[in-house]
């Protein structure tokens, strides 16, 4: 059966191009460098690579600008802080200077005192430890 018999003899019908070689037909005329850059842009968008790099740079700049030692980033307290910020409600703003130096400091001191209270109750044990540290025994 031929095409005229199946589709009729329409003179307005157009012939569709048929690929006759093994060459791939591209529907998006792009150059290889454009394809490479668009793929990179897509990957960057998927994983927000440029945004992450900007945040990393701001963290580093804060450390450099305030003379904070690099080893602070190995601290479990640093990891806890970053996790808390990531899980904070949208729009979270860091505490201000006064809050950190007053209310939050008092609260943290209370936690440390409570954690050390069992050691402080046993005065003889504590005095013995202090003598050992001072090298008097």
Image (cartoon, helix red, strand yellow):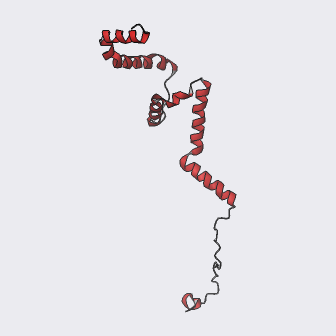
Q: Is residue 82 above or below residue 46?
A: above
Q: Where does the image place residue 3, in percent across and percent down from the top left?
A: 58, 88
- Identify which residue is drawn at 61% across, 27% down: 64
13 or 78, nearer to the observer: 78
Q: Image quarter for residue 114?
A: top left
Q: Is residue 26 above or below residue 9?
A: above
Q: Where does the image place residue 61, in percent across and percent down from the top left?
A: 61, 30
Residue furthest top in the image: 136
Q: Where does the image place residue 115, in percent across and percent down from the top left?
A: 35, 20
Q: Image quarter for residue 105?
A: top left
- Identify which residue is drawn at 50% across, 31% down: 74
Q: Image quarter for residue 23?
A: bottom right
User: How many marks do you count on the picture?
Assistant: 0
Quadrant where the N terminus sits is bottom right
Quadrant where the C terminus sits is top left
Q: Where does the image place residue 71, in percent across and percent down from the top left?
A: 53, 28
- Identify which residue is drawn at 60% across, 35% down: 57
Residue furthest front in the image: 137
């Amino acid at each position: 059966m031929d095409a005229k018999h199946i589709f009729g003899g329409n003179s307005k019908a157009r012939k569709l191009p048929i690929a006759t070689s093994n060459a791939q037909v591209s529907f998006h005329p792009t150059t290889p460098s454009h394809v490479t850059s668009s793929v990179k842009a897509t990957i960057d968008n998927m994983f927000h690579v440029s945004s992450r790099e900007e945040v990393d740079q701001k963290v580093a700049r804060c450390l450099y600008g305030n003379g904070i030692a690099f080893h602070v980033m190995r601290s479990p307290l640093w990891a806890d802080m970053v996790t808390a910020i990531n899980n904070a409600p949208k729009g979270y703003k860091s505490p201000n200077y006064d809050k950190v130096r007053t209310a939050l400091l008092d609260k943290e001191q209370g936690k440390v005192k409570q954690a050390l209270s069992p050691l402080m109750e046993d005065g003889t044990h504590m005095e013995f430890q202090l003598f050992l540290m001072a090298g008097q025994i």
